[in-house]
Image (cartoon, grey):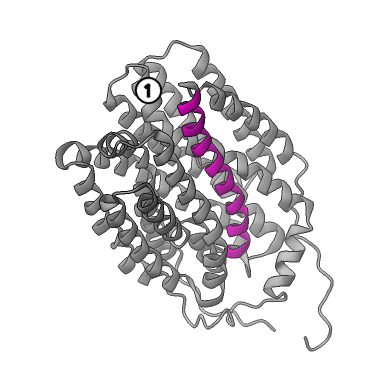
Amino acid sequence: MPHHPKSLSINQVLICGAAIVTVSMGIRHGFGLWLQPITQDQNWSRETFAFAIAIQNLVWGFSGIFAGMLADRFGAFRVIVAGALLYALGLYGMAHATSALGFSLTAGVLIGMAQAGTTYAIIYGVIGRNISANRRSWAMGIAAAAGSFGQFLMVPTEGFLIDHFGWQQALVTLAVAALLMMPLAWGLREPHFRGGAGHFREQSIMQALREAFQYRSFQLLMAGYFVCGFQVVFIGVHMPSYLKDHGLAPQVASYSLALIGLFNVFGTYASGVLGQRMQKKNILAFIYFTRAVVISIFLLVPLTPMSVYVFSAVMGLLWLSTVPPTNAAVAQIFGVAHLSMLSGFVFFSHQIGSFMGVWLGGFLYDRTGSYDIVWYIAIGLGVLASLVNLPIKEAAIIRAPLPQGA
């Protein structure tokens, strides 16, 4: 019989997990505010900055696979502590980088690794192991909403720090703030977690991976999540510059990103609640298609501060609302024993999309002087992602029973 150790309380998991995601996601959501100050001060092209952030997203996704494996095996506590240290080092290094290579290594590699150890896949693993299935999607919605609240809270704060202390000192201040995740990680130490022994596994890591990658629905979830990454990171990083290029005040960009974060609190919570009642694939298909419609309308209407704020509010409802149903679907299909690792692979697909979105934004802007092509790509991908989510089968996968004594 599998042995199930005493679980952490639901309040402890949600408070500590949500606070960690608030800090980690809150910091990274504001990176677009640094694009123009850094490129102008360092005399770099926008592509140089965009490439470093693209590397960050790619490293985040790739490192997330291994961070998930470690968290599933040894618990989340150690992984989060290491991630917080890397975050602080990366932000400090980002403030003092004097070359494009140094900027890519700090803003890209170090912070990407840090985010892998301090964001959703790791926190969702703890939720999966400690919160029952009938409340799991809701709890994931709470954690995702916390990340959104972090954006609402941190983006204006980061704008204030840049305006009053300069972009370098602002990054150093955030480096100190990142260390707050270390004491919060203590609250996610799972009792008697010894190499996963307390959580029964009927599969090895390789068996779990082989099963997932041969399963059509897992492939479709990954494809949809690629589009999510492309859209949100392109908008999050390039929106401030897009608005400034069109003559809007810098405060419009800060308020825009903050509104996305504020309304995403409601969107992610709602998608988590709906995930307990509706098929998750239908929620995802609706989100991706609606994003395509909203972006299309945004490009068609005159660009004013009010149109930006309306777009940001509606897009905020759809921003990270894909996260709870996607991860809850993975847990529902495959179980929770390897949840952080499998979520890490799905998220890697998301981050490949993020890499393409943020890098193409800078690349095509430098060559065409416009973001129009990338906006059109984001619309087309939204329609495609809506379609690929519809055939997903969410029922728990049926495995052959283990041999006697295995």
Viewer-proximal residue, 7 or 261?
261
Q: Which residue is at a point 28% across and 21% down the rendered structure image?
A: 249
- Across and down, in percent, residue 55 comes to 48, 49
The answer to whether residue 270 is above or below residue 70 is above
The answer to whether residue 185 is above or below residue 104 is below
Q: Is residue 353 left or right of residue 172?
A: right
In reply to whether residue 355 is colored magenta, the answer given is yes
Secondary structure of the residue carrying numbered label 1: helix
Snapshot quadrant of residue 132: bottom right
Q: Is residue 305 left or right of residue 120?
A: left
Q: Which residue is at a point 81% across and 64% down the rendered structure image?
A: 398
Residue behind mark 1 = 243
Q: Which residues are magenta?
A: 340-367
- Across and down, in percent, residue 230 comes to 56, 38
Q: Is residue 165 left or right of residue 8?
A: left
Snapshot quadrant of residue 206: bottom right
Viewer-proximal residue, 93 or 44?
44
Residue furthest to the top in view is 302
The prevailing secondary structure element of the residues shown in magenta is: helix
Amino acid type shown at disc 1? Leu
Classify mark 1: residues with Cα within 10 Å, few (<14), some (14-19) or many (20+).
Answer: some
Snapshot quadrant of residue 5: bottom right
Q: Which residue is at a point 53% across and 72% down the rendered structure image?
A: 70
Q: Quadrant of the C terminus?
A: bottom right
- Across and down, in percent, residue 395 comes to 75, 54
Q: Quadrant of the N terminus?
A: bottom right
Q: Which residue is at a point 66% across and 48% down the rendered structure image?
A: 222
Q: Is residue 366 left or right of residue 251?
A: right
Viewer-proximal residue, 294 or 145?
294
Q: Is residue 141 visible?
A: no
Q: Is residue 138 visible?
A: yes
